[in-house]
Image (cartoon, helix red, strand yellow):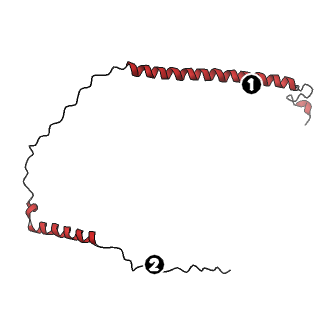
Amino acid sequence: MPTENIPDQDFENIPTFEEKSSRMKFKKGSLFIFVAIFAILLTGLLATAIFWGFNQQASKKTLPSKPTPTPTLSTSQETLTPSLYATDAAILKIEQDVKNLDQELQGADLKENSLNPPALDWQIEFKE
């Protein structure tokens, strides 16, 4: 592949170090100016938004506060007739039995201290 056919390679007109550094300075300078302008605009927009937010809060009119009225409770409750099963002897006996069973369960010690896991043999040897 001859180098004469490649248009991008111009070895006779290689830029010197001074030309490269001046180009880099120009690029760095323009980049710095762009970043500085962007930062100033961003800071200005942020300051405007904060200032606008404070002005909107200050301009809101507050309504005079009225105390909320205390709710009144009506003590007139309807007296309903009790269920037929509320005074049934069988239901009352079942309810008492359930209470007794619950008390026995609450007082029972469900831990079995005599049941311990067996001791393990940690002397394990692997044979090939």
Query: What residue sits 56% from the left and 20% below the top?
Result: 44
Disc 1 marks a residue whose amino acid type is: Lys
Given contact means CB atoms under 8 Å apart, are the residues at marks 1 and 2 in contact? Answer: no
Along the line of sight, which residue is nearer the eye, 7 or 113? 113
86 left or right, relative to 126: left
**Distance from Cα at disc 1 to Cα at disc 2:** 76 Å
- Above or below residue 101? Residue 52 is above
- Rendered location of residue 68, percent (x, y): 22, 31
- Rendered location of residue 83, percent (x, y): 9, 58
Along the line of sight, which residue is nearer the eye, 106 or 34? 106
Element assignment for label 1? helix
Residue 65 placement: quadrant? top left
Query: Label 1: how many residues lie within 10 Å, few (<14), some (14-19) or many (20+)?
Result: few
Q: Where residue 28 is drawn, which disc sits there?
A: 1
Query: Label 2: how many residues lie within 10 Å, few (<14), some (14-19) or many (20+)?
Result: few
Query: What residue sits 10% from the left and 43% below the top?
Result: 75
Query: What residue sits 47% from the left and 80% below the top?
Result: 118
Front label number (1 vs 2)? 2
Element assignment for label 2? loop
124 left or right, relative to 71: right
Say whether disc 1 or disc 2 marks the residue closer to the N-terminus.
1
Report which residue position mark 2 lands on.
Answer: 117
40 left or right, relative to 31: left
In which quadrant will I find the N terminus? top right
In which quadrant will I find the C terminus? bottom right
Disc 2 marks a residue whose amino acid type is: Pro
Q: Where residue 14 is drawn, which disc sits there?
A: none
